[in-house]
Image (spheres, coloured by chain):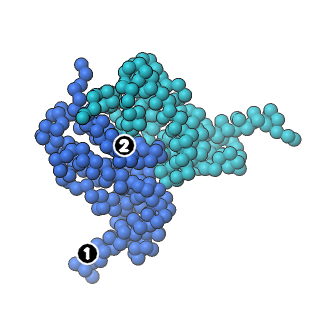
Chain colours: A cyan, B blue
Amino acid sequence: MSPGPNAARRSESSRKAILAATEELCRENGYRKLTIEAIAARAGVGKTTIYRWWPSRGAIVLELLDETATVGTAPPNTGDLAADLRALLQEVIDIIVPADTSPGVGLMAESLQDPELGRALRERLIEPRIETFKQRLRQAQDAGQLPADADLEVALDLLYGPIYHRLALHLGMPDSDHLDALIAHVLRALTAPKAG
Amino acid sequence: MSPGPNAARRSESSRKAILAATEELCRENGYRKLTIEAIAARAGVGKTTIYRWWPSRGAIVLELLDETATVGTAPPNTGDLAADLRALLQEVIDIIVPADTSPGVGLMAESLQDPELGRALRERLIEPRIETFKQRLRQAQDAGQLPADADLEVALDLLYGPIYHRLALHLGMPDSDHLDALIAHVLRALTAPKAG
């Protein structure tokens, strides 16, 4: 029997079941205890089905995040730059808390020790979202809210950096006031006249 | 036989051998492959000796980093604030590259999934060094290089954040020019007049 529409439908439903099982198990027990065996059992598929599509649990989580992370190719633009940046940062915070059962944090932790997975994470998940972020900053430049020569690479590091710093060093996520203060400081740095 | 000076000396030499073996094995094969068995074999001690002193490989690496990370209780103060901040940041960068064989990155990755180890990392390794960093900023405030009301918590996040952001997302460490630009932006943010 050749694979036809029914086979394709069955595959897609298996794929979705596998991603859903991965997310559920991670939220229940943490990424550390996530195994291909457990995912297969929960999704009601065979292990070979999983290994046909993905080389590792990290690859499954990468696909899961790519489908569920809501940052699209068009950035939010309400006209209020600080508010839009806050929405973008809040989205990252929502992905990484609570850290010990977050699929995103599990993937980050694993990719720190696996350069190949790290490269896939960067290329598939991160770079397109950095592009979306920069697009929003370019819109702010066009609107005269940021100088034309503002350093967008610096802006990226300064805005997103605190979240990862606090995650890596277990300092707790920024509260609402601290998040506002961070964004205000960065916008001030980008717009203040340079010395010399 | 009661433990006397000789026993204490033997213990200290075993402890040092265990820490050295841990560092060597991590640099050779990566944290991922680090096992208590391999550490014991390399250090020439029994596994029970290791388990008597440390509950896990993470705890050994924490002690290793606490002994080798050079940030002391007194911050560098050459009078040049940007240069001193750069020295502090460079020290962190030196600890985390290359990421896949760095004991520090291994510990960070593991502690992302182990809240208990994360708490030990923060209390033993991070908080004293944050205090050293803030001490340097307070000296800058006393010297009139930073406003008395500069937000030191924001400064901490903005200065160290980029390193962890780039580490977590596999964006590569900042080069020399980018590091200078980051520091210049943060100092501008801390000194520029606040809006409103």
State the SS at label 2: helix
The residue lying at 70 percent from left, 38 percent from top is A14
Nearer-the-camera pick, A186 or A13 = A186
**Location of residue A7 (image quadrant):** top right
Query: From what the image shows, is residue B86 above or below residue A178?
Result: below
Query: From what the image shows, is residue A102 above or below residue B10?
Result: above
Q: Residue A24: x and y, percent?
A: 56, 39
Nearer-the-camera pick, A139 or A13 = A139
Q: Can residue A51 be seen?
A: yes
Q: Residue B94: x and y, percent?
A: 35, 55
- Specify which label sits upstream in the sequence, 2 or 1: 1
State the SS at label 1: helix
In the rendered view of the protein, which quadrant contains the C terminus of chain B? top left
Q: Residues within 10 Å of mark 1 (few under 14, many from 20)?
A: few
Q: Amino acid at mark 1?
A: Ala
Image mark for residue A102? none
Q: Residue A138: x and y, percent?
A: 44, 26
The residue lying at 40 percent from left, 59 percent from top is B103
The residue wearing badge 1 is B8
Q: Residues within 10 Å of mark 2 (few under 14, many from 20)?
A: some
Judging from the image, mark 2 belongs to the subunit labelled: B
The residue wearing badge 2 is B178
Q: CA distance from mark 2 to mark 1?
A: 48 Å
- Residue mark closest to the camera, 2 vs 1: 2
Query: From what the image shows, is residue A174 above or below residue B57?
Result: above
Q: Can residue A168 be seen?
A: no
Judging from the image, mark 1 belongs to the subunit labelled: B
